[in-house]
Amino acid sequence: MKVDIEIERSIVIPLPPEKVRPLFDDIESTVARFPKLKKLTKVAKDQYVWELSTIGSRMAKIAHDVTYGAHYQRSADGSELSWKPLSNKGNASIAGVFRVREHKSGSEISFKVDGELRDVPVPLIYRLVAPPFIQGKFIHLVETFLERTRDALLDQKAAAPAKKKAAAK
């Protein structure tokens, strides 16, 4: 069964955009925060294959091990990281964009994905409920990813003064 995925979520971080934009300079470290990421393989410059652990419910027999390839591109001003699917890589095609925008409380990071999962094994009885169920699982993964990203950025901010104090001694 083919399942379409369309998700857009955002989170506010109390840091100015110039402190958040470097996030897009290190794709591998940023992507490593994504829940269920089992393996990330670099296949060329700015091109990676994602392998995710099982998403769904094995008990309900709605479970899928997602693999897909993506070609990443950063915007000229560094405020956006977008990706397009690599053809013939895995059982999914996922495109998206990860943006940083100025916000009255600091920065807003938004994450949008659009694509499809192919060959999802779903028993006939669950065919109607499987797409929203799987979409819900992906929404949770994206929200967790944004929270982890926010926490990592805030941890870096907290670590910076401690490093300065240690260097001053």
Image: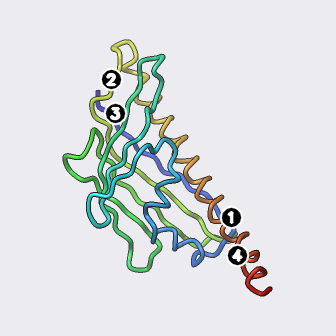
Give the residue displayed 38% in from the left and 71% down from the top: 74
Give the label, 2 or 4, closer to the camera: 4
Given the image, on which type of amino acid does mark 1 rest?
A: Asp
Mark 2, Cα crowd under 10 Å, few <14 / some 14-19 / many 20+, is: some
Q: CA distance from mark 1 to mark 4?
A: 9 Å
Say left or right for 144 vs 70. Answer: right
155 with respect to 64 (left or right): right
Residue 130 position within the rendered picture, expressed as x and y whole percent measured from the top left: 41, 25
Q: Label 4: how many residues lie within 10 Å, few (<14), some (14-19) or many (20+)?
A: few
Mark earlier in primary sequence (2, 1): 2
- Quadrant in the rendering for residue 47: bottom left
Say which of marks 2 and 3 sits in front.
2
Distance from the alpha carbon under mark 3 to that under mark 4: 43 Å
Location of the C terminus (image quadrant): bottom right
User: Decide: marks 3, 4 in contact (CB < 8 A)?
Assistant: no
Q: Could you tell me which secondary element the residue under label 3 belongs to?
A: strand
Whether pointer 2 and pointer 4 mark residues with C-beta atoms closer than 8 Å, the reply is no
State which quarter of the image contains the N terminus.
top left
- Residue 136 position, x and y percent, is 50, 35
Asked which secondary structure carries label 1, the reply is helix
Q: Position of residue 93 (x, y in %)?
A: 29, 46
Q: Amino acid at mark 4?
A: Ala
Q: Which mark is residue 155?
A: 1
Which residue is pictured at 48% across the width and 65% down the height?
99
Q: Which residue is under mark 3? A: 3
Instruction: Indicate which disc, 2 or 3, sits on the residue closer to the N terminus.
Output: 3
Q: Nearer the viewer, mark 2 or mark 1?
A: 1
Name the residue beneath numbered marker 2: 121
